[in-house]
Amino acid sequence: MSYVLGLKCKECGHRVPVSPVHVCEACFGPYEVEYDYQAMRGRVTRQSIESGPRSLWRYKDLLPIEGEPQTGFHSGFTPLKRAHRLGRELGVSQLWIKDDSCNYPTYSYKERVVSVAISKAVEFGFDTVGCASTGNLANSTAAHAAEAGLRCFVMIPHDLEQGKVLGSLVFGPQVVRIAGNYDEVNRLCTQIADKYGWAIVNVNLRPYYTEGAKTHGFEIAEQLGWKLPQHTIIPTAGGTILPKVYKAYKELIELGLVEDNRPKIYSAQAAGCNPVVKAIHEGTDNIEPQKPRTLAKSIAIGNPADGLYAYQVVTQSGGWGESATDRQIVDAIKLLAKTEGIWTEPAGGTTLAAAIKLIEQGRIPRDESIVISITGNGLKTQEAVVDELPVRRVIEPKITDFDQWMEQEPEISDRLATVL
Ligand SMILES: *Cc1c(COP(=O)(O)O)cnc(C)c1O
Ligand SMILES: [Zn+2]
């Protein structure tokens, strides 16, 4: 059974039945899925969720799916890792990493939104799916489309990291490389969705797609023992995941599954693309578009579709935002790897770097509970660190060579990039 009532415009409240539309016919605002929380009360419980599958589908009652899921049977339910060593480094006592860098099958938070969107595309009877992507969404859409046997077109900016491009191509979709930035790719995708009648997961299926991001928040709460963290730091690109984690927290409060501790949400962006953080700092809800210039390509969205909602959640929850330079992003990638054994991509480096600033500023108290949201995997973005991880000379397979190697200063090192 489904608790979905229909779609409701976030701006004017106009309601329409469930269908593949995303823009309000009355005011052009975005539609959002509306649920019958009254009917959920007493039926959607901690026990009902805990007895579900060990995937994001354990929260199916809170997702906009009518029938059975089509993909994502192993997606979600990623680790929430207590980060003792990183916590000591940052001088905080209760730190966790929500680690979507190991999300199955393409190693990013996007499995959550794509699992719901692809299942919905099948329900609506589409045979072709697609997306506008900075890389991870393309990888995930291509993989889930392959699993569901759907035709797939992914549109990406031409200058993505090799791992992100190969990470789509291998699944056999049509990969359309476009000479433009993400915002230009996205505009083209909107026209394609209209003209060709395909299910573009983050365009015409956007109301369903975005709901999948709630599972990141549901899992944090469940894995903390049905408690909400006081502070959650989340990256902001198009502005999907941040407001949806907050929505997840609010829904659990509404259903009486967690106590309301007034959780605060913080936005992390790269300094080279920080329209939402800039608006937060300036206290204006006018999100001014930017031209992205950052190595954090997966979150380089200069004109975020849901930037306003990210802004609103941060300010209403009493959080804040910070941005990080490319240098700080790479340092944070290395710090997370060296302290916790997690290799994240620049989006994760951005989030950790922003968290460090917020703690140092005193905006996040050192003795309160903190979750840092790690959304992608470093193996896909080797370009970010390859130039500065030194390797030492090759030795002969002899113990005397090794003895020498031990005695020599590590200065005779080389850069991996030049060795390769
Ligand atoms: C897509 C993405 C995000 C966040 O994007 P939103 O559009 O704001 O939800 C964050 N990190 C990574 C690695 C991503 O791929
Ligand atoms: Zn409207």
Image (cartoon, rainbow, N blue to C red):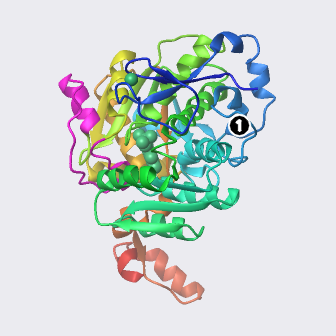
Look at the image and tell me whether residue 45 can be seen: yes
Residue visible at 50% across and 86% down in the picture: 395
The magenta-colored residue range is 275-303
Task: For the C terminus, give its image quadrant.
Answer: bottom left
* Residue at point 73%, 46% (across, down): 73
Q: Quadrant of residue 170?
A: bottom right
Magenta stretch holds residue 300 = yes
The residue tagged 1 is 57
Q: Residue furthest right?
A: 51
Circle 1 crowding by C-alpha within 10 Å: few under 14, some 14–19, many from 20: many
- At label 1, the amino acid type is Trp
Label 1 CB, ligand 1: below 8 Å?
A: no
**Vertical placement of 49 versus 325: above or below?**
above
Q: x%, y% of residue 17? A: 57, 27
Q: Position of residue 398 (x, y in %)?
A: 59, 88
Asked whether 80 or 163 is in front, the reply is 163
Would you say the magenta stretch is mainly helix, strand or loop? loop
Q: Quadrant of residue 159?
A: bottom left
